[in-house]
Image (cartoon, helix red, strand yellow):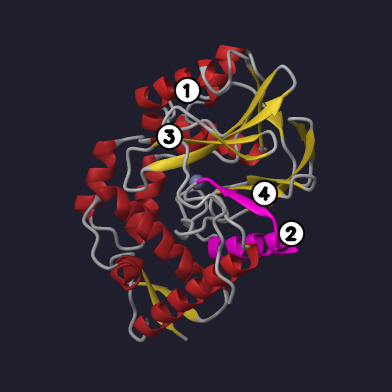
Amino acid sequence: MHRLRYPFHDDVPLPGEAMTVAPGVLWHKMPLPFALNHINLWLLEEEGGWCAVDAGYGSDETRALWERQFTGTMGGRPLVRMVATHYHPDHIGLADWLATRFDAPFHCSLGEFAYARAVWHDLPGFDVAALNCHFAKHGLGADKVAQFVERGNTYHWGVPSLPVNFNRILAGDVLRLGGADWQTIPGYGHSPEHMALWCVEKKVLISGDMLLPRISTNVGAWGSDPEVDALGQFIASIERFLALPEDTLVLPSHGKPFHGIAPRVEALKAHHVERLAALRAACTEPKSAMDLVPVLFGRIFDLYQTMFALAECIAHLNHLWHRGEVRRDVDDAGVYRFHLV
Ligand SMILES: [Zn+2]
């Protein structure tokens, strides 16, 4: 299997600065307050200004770095368009702040826009209560449920405000950005309606979180659609990227730009096949998703990591369940137990 190639090696943009990775396409990085400590953002040079793809997490640190970009990298020219790949806080966090400041139109898919608002406003089904109900059915203990309740809506931490309106991006749309055509490629399983952007002319794919070089994208089943086969959706989505040319430069949201779509897609598929096999092997007796989290992730203590690990474990179990490889029964305590068929 071919390895990935990283054309920029050890060159990375410094905080508040940017690096050209393709004609008119600039890479800049912003900090994140998590174990995953950075996000890559992209600036496309437009006539008379810039198009920003993704906005960064809503922190003072990110705002201060954007201020440096406004005068430095952007040379005082305005943002004329704001595009978000998806609704997660590190991507959409400062989108409203940026779009409002420059009176720039905001673009994203309906799935992401609507989901962002539903989560932000704690709508029933998208709130902490729905998540806790879902997690409790999968074996999360009452102590952890209480901690989630106490923590409240963490989406606000990274998304202080959201744009009140948007320009809807549809799957397969061609957007004219920075004087070039960018085709949208929808992705599912990580977020409701993620949009990657593919430029034929530049042979560049802005992959968002749907194709990352080093880490495996989080694929989860959450409170709003608890029985979703998110893993099946994710695998089918990344297979779409195989249609792109082999020499495509992939610009991921985390990690370094790389060449090698096919080997990366194959490696991710193999990774999930291996994890499904490990879960099957552990389901010789009825087990809850919470019992099975250590099979995928080892021991986890942190509440934030528990949330993603459990959602991901449920997504894997849902995949096996939808494929008829495991049964799902309910025990006396009302907890789902998965068992090999
Ligand atoms: Zn994401």
Q: In the rendered image, is residue 327 in sight?
A: no
User: Is residue 340 rendered to the left or right of residue 333?
Assistant: right
For the residues labelled 2 and 4, the Cα–Cα distance comes to: 9 Å
- Residue tagged by mark 2? 244
Mark in the foreground, 3 or 1: 3
- Residue tagged by mark 1? 66
Q: Is mark 4 within 8 Å of ligand 1?
A: no
Q: The magenta stretch spans which residues?
A: 230-253
Q: Amino acid at mark 1?
A: Trp
Q: Are marks 1 and 4 in contact (CB under 8 Å)?
A: no
Q: Are marks 2 and 4 in contact (CB under 8 Å)?
A: yes
Identify the element where label 3 is drawn.
loop
Q: Please state the horizontal and vertical placement of residue 334, each as a whole percent of the image.
A: 33, 64
For the residues labelled 3 and 1, the Cα–Cα distance comes to: 13 Å
- Residue tagged by mark 4? 205
Q: Residue at x 31, y 35 (%)?
A: 152
Q: Amino acid at mark 4?
A: Leu
As displayed, is residue 250 above or below residue 129? below
Q: Please state the horizontal and vertical placement of residue 196, each as a whole percent of the image.
A: 65, 46
For the residues labelled 1 and 2, the Cα–Cα distance comes to: 32 Å
- Residue tagged by mark 3? 14
- Mark 4 and mark 3 lie on one chain; the one further toward the N terminus is 3
Residue 254, disc: none
Q: Please state the horizontal and vertical placement of residue 157, each as a whole percent of the image.
A: 36, 30
